Amino acid sequence: TKINGKCLMYWGEKFINLATSEDLVNWTPAVDENGKLKVLVAPRDGYFDSQFTECGPPAVLTDKGIVLLYNGKNEPGGRGDTRYTANTYAAGQVLFDKKQPEKVLNRLDKPFFIPEMSFEKSGQYPAGTVFVEGLVYFKNKWFLYYGCADSRVGVAIYQP
């Protein structure tokens, strides 16, 4: 779906950025007045996403705005959220304005998806990892595909 006549892509590692395209081949990143990449979402001290934010599946256009699921990493050493293990990867959500897709309307302060199962707390990242990557709506259900500690792939299913 085009927004303001263009296709959108939220992207980035550490920060969440935006790029637009007219043909889905050539992309133009959003930049500030100095020509630097415009940062839309950044890590926050004291939250689950204190070390970095990284885009998950492609964003979903809703009647309330554009919902982007993203991955956050909890910073060790006091900057992170003490409710979660240091270095935990968990998933958050941010809502962007559908008329101004660079504008954040809302952002979860707590992750909506955290590592809880043993296979999400073993392997390469034993601090715990759920890393959301794919989202599919099929037969009235949402299927959220995610990495489990870089050792397995899981799917969480939601039926509205």
Image (cartoon, rainbow, N blue to C red):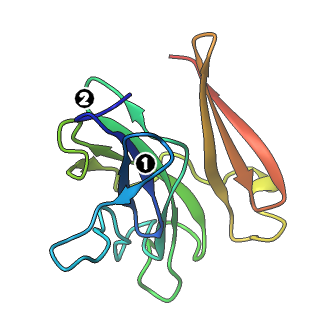
- What residue lies at 32% left-to-right and 72% top-to-bottom? 37
In-image side of 35 versus 28 (left or right): left
**Residue displayed at 41% across by 69% down:** 15
- Kindly identify which residue carries mark 2: 64
Q: In which quadrant of the rendered view does residue 23 lie?
A: top left
Circle 1 sits in a helix, a strand or a loop, which is it?
Answer: strand
Secondary structure beneath disc 2? Answer: loop
- Image disc number at residue 9: 1
Q: Which mark is residue 63?
A: none
Whether 92 is drawn above or below 128: the answer is above
* Of labels 2 and 1, the one closer to you: 1
- Residue 53 image position (x, y, % from top left): 46, 65
Q: Looking at the image, do the residues carrying marks 2 and 1 touch, with CB atoms under 8 Å apart?
A: no
**In this view, which residue lies farthest toward the top?**
139
**Frontmost residue, 151 versus 13:** 13
Please, is residue 14 above or below residue 135 in the view?
below
From the image, which quarter does the N terminus lie in? top left
Residue 54 drawn at (x, y percent): 50, 62
Q: Earlier in the sequence, mark 2 or mark 1?
A: 1
Q: How many marks?
A: 2
What's the residue at 69%, 71% (across, down)? 127
Q: Is residue 19 left or right of residue 85?
A: left
- The amino acid marked with disc number 2 is Lys
Residue at (18% x, 37% y) in the render: 99
